[in-house]
Image (cartoon, rainbow, N blue to C red):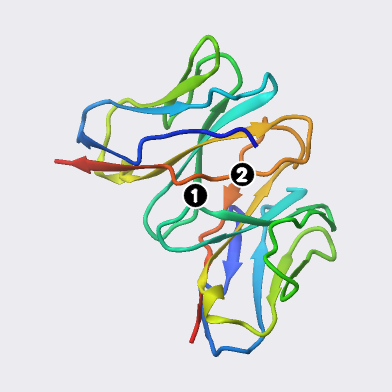
Amino acid sequence: DAKTTQPNSMESNEEEPVHLPCNHSTISGTDYIHWYRQLPSQGPEYVIHGLTSNVNNRMASLAIAEDRKSSTLILHRATLRDAAVYYCILRATGTASKLTFGTGTRLQVTL
Amino acid sequence: GAGVSQTPSNKVTEKGKYVELRCDPISGHTALYWYRQSLGQGPEFLIYFQGTGAADDSGLPNDRFFAVRPEGSVSTLKIQRTERGDSAVYLCASSPNGAGGNYGYTFGSGTRLTVV
């Protein structure tokens, strides 16, 4: 599986935007970029995914670099409920592939 | 159902005992995954089912661990002769299709297994 690199932790103030970076320099042309988050004492929750173009949904936006070697998950207005561990994962297409989790970025949101 | 259901939510067992953990995936999801998560770590893949068959069991740590999905819906993870090192949260996820990166997973809340 292609590897991703994320900062161990980040902090944000409530109501401010948060940009969570992910590096994936060994991404292949058929890998999707997936983001999940895990709130305390819960299972991971799907956030967003994309292939080449930027993506928006009700939870977040995903900005993908032109060379696809990095991406950024954008939370437009952080709330206390967004405090979680955020995982950036590459998932191959066309194969029976599994998600391989790293250690993710622990996001702290303060008032 | 609306989500992935895992039962029990908590299980305490004595070392050496046998345990079964159950997962009810989202109706119609053909792919089902089991993961294990230790404190402070990301989820670790155990096994993946596509329909009734185990398409990838490369993550099962040893032959004490076994999983089945006989009718292509509910799955049971079975652990024989439990050890204290098996203590973890066991997560189940389902997806509309296992092949292809264009599908997200839906996870259950997990079963917290404690072996004493």
- For the residues tagged 1 and 2, is the chain the same? no
Task: Say if B19 sits above or below B95 in the image.
Answer: below
Task: Say if A24 sits above or below A105 in the image.
Answer: above
Looking at the rendered structure, the secondary structure element under dot 2 is loop
Q: Residue furthest left?
A: A111
Please tell me which residue lies in front, A36 or A88: A88
Q: Which mark is residue A72?
A: none
- The reply, left or right, for residue A41 in relation to residue B63 is left
Identify the residue at image location x=65%, y=37%: A1
Looking at the rendered structure, the secondary structure element under dot 1 is loop
Identify the residue at image location x=70%, y=81%: B80
Please indicate, yes or no, whether residue B28 appears anywhere in the rendered image: no
Q: Which mark is residue B105?
A: 2
- The reply, left or right, for residue A49 in relation to residue B62 is left
Identify the residue at image location x=72%, y=76%: B64
Give percent across and percent down for residue A76.
32, 25
Q: Which residue is tagged 1?
A: A44
Three-letter residue code for mark 1 = Pro
